[in-house]
Image (cartoon, rainbow, N blue to C red):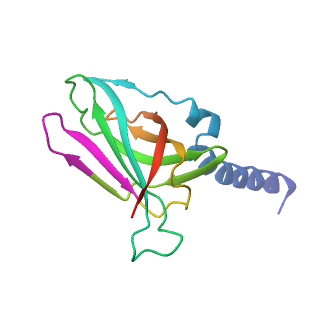
Amino acid sequence: MPARMHLWFGLALWVVLLCPAVAIAEPRLKDLLAAPEQLPLAGGTLRLEVDLWRDFMPIAPADGRPLMASITLKPMRGAVLPDALAVESVWVVNGQQLWMAEPGEVRLSDGASPSLVVVVRDGPKWGPGIDVDVVVRIRTATGESRLLRAAGQRIERTD
């Protein structure tokens, strides 16, 4: 193979290998911690309500079950939930430690103000009784990705 062909092949391989990494780059810890706690979108502003827990009931292992989270995206002050809103990823931040999860269960909640509920399971065995930050990456109807955070959320214990 001529030298010029080697060069083009090497360049093409570099582009193929590098581009997927750029396309799926995850936010850095400092970006997650800088995410806003309210997110203005068409139709209103969203915020998160978070429940975090570890199960220590008698049928659970002695050191408890892994972390679970129920995260609700709620419109504020009578606003409506935007159409075609998707939760792509969830992060739980404990100091310098980070757990990333794909949404396992996503559903619309009924009520006076519809909201989107996301459940993630099988997290780390942090806590209970510690505070963490929870961040979600939302994809809007226009395809834009945005981060939204709930700071200082307590990991509870169920017995």
Horizontally, is 14 left or right of 92 in the view? right
Q: Position of residue 142 (x, y in %)?
A: 35, 32
Q: Which residues are magenta?
A: 107-120
- Say which residue appears at 27% left-offset and 26% top-offset: 76
**Quarter of the rendering occupied by the C terminus:** bottom left
- Say which residue appears at 53% left-offset and 43% top-offset: 131
Q: Position of residue 117 (x, y in %)?
A: 29, 47
Q: Tell me if residue 109 comes above or below residue 57 in the rendering.
A: above
User: Which of 136 and 82 lies nearest the eye of the viewer?
Assistant: 136
User: Which of 123 and 148 lies nearest the eye of the viewer?
Assistant: 123
Q: Position of residue 143 (x, y in %)?
A: 38, 36
- Say which residue appears at 44% left-offset and 67% top-offset: 56
Magenta span: chief secondary structure: strand
Q: Tell me if residue 126 comes above or below residue 76 in the rendering.
A: below
**Quarter of the rendering occupied by the N terminus:** bottom right
Q: Using the rendered view, name the quadrant where residue 33 is placed.
A: top right
